[in-house]
Amino acid sequence: MSVMKKLLTSAVVAATMFGGAASAEEMRIALVVKALGIGFFEAAAKGAEEAAAELGGVEIIYTGPTDTTAEGQIEVINALIAQKVDAIAISANDQDALVPALKKAMDRGITVISWDSGVAPAGRQMHLNPSSNPLIGNMIIKLAADHLPDGGDVAVLSASATATNQNIWIDEMNMVTGNYPGINVVATVYGDDLADKSYREAQGLMASYPDLKAIIAPTTVGIVAAAQAVTDAGKIGEINVTGLALPSEMAGHIDSGASKSFAIWNPIDLGYAATMIAYNLATDKAVAEAGKSIPMGRMGDVMLDDERAGAMSDPFVYDASNVHDFKDIF
Ligand code: RAM
């Protein structure tokens, strides 16, 4: 045993004797989000805390940059490496740009997974998708098409242009748009998961496409901003805002008619599941290998595909009939 390790061990023993061992022995899992101040990620953090309480001896470090950039996340990752955290569970702003920093983390023995928005396989041990990507892609166009029996122009208001998750969902959506005759996707714009930029982009869409019938925002930040822009423009009833959202943030816009419906999976469950996976990998209770499954506590197991990615559960549709039952939960 090295001198350093011996010293550490005796410090822990001493702390145990004097009743202060908990913090010295705690495992630290960093939940790194696209940016701070986003309700979706705050709900995921609740789930992470729930998992930590269930496991015991786990500290959650909830962190992220102030805007949705890869540069901001690289700074955060480097700080976490310096702090010698045990695991990093990240929702990525860019699937490739983060790889070198995350490789460095893995080289130092830190468990690295991505969740929500993925990192390329070289930069993480596994990735947890919230749901099946083709299913989400189909769902977001269907939500718009279901309210446009005669077809019409629709536009996409996304998050950042490099967001892995939104880019995959939009690709999947574009692959099935032909199944919805008369629906024309006229533009895709990016609000960077910033409320004010998303609002301006929604205004821009309305100005550029006077016949616009729906805005599809596969982001919880973008959809709220778009609903507000449509409301402020006096276009409720003319333009339906749909996509992915939190019931807590959209109930008012369902009531006003700015949005007829939207979908989402449970973000609390997603944060819970990501934390359980990080813990099980960090403690060698599971391995991240293609074809293997990893336990996620009360969420069951996730089975990993050839790219060591797996999906949690199906999204759920919210509308006037049920949004108020869920708005106090997430
Ligand atoms: C925003 C973020 C997140 C995405 C949700 C739907 O909160 O972009 O990554 O999963 O929307």
Image (cartoon, rainbow, N blue to C red):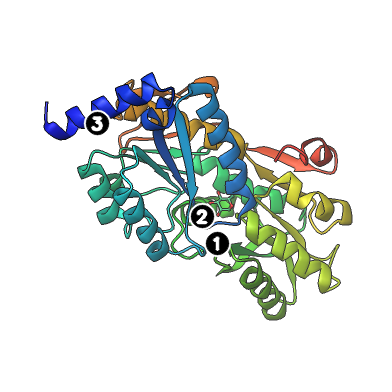
The spot of residue 216 in percent (x, y) is: 65, 58
Q: Secondary structure at mark 2?
A: helix
Q: Secondary structure at mark 3?
A: helix
- Position of 111 with respect to 163 (left or right) is left
Q: Is residue 147 visible?
A: yes
Q: Ligand 1: does it lie within 8 Å of the C-beta at label 2?
A: yes
Query: Disc 2 or 1, which lies upstream in sequence?
Result: 1
Amino acid type for the residue under numbered disc 1: Ala
The residue to which callout 1 is attached is 159
Q: Ligand 1: does it lie within 8 Å of the C-beta at label 1?
A: yes
Q: Quadrant of the N terminus?
A: top left
* Mark 2 to mark 3 CA distance (whole Å): 45 Å
CA neighbours of label 2 inside 10 A, class few (<14), some (14 to 19), many (20+): many
Above or below, 202 against 6 in this view is below
Q: Residue at x 85, y 38 (%)?
A: 321
Q: Residue 8: which numbered mark, if any? A: 3
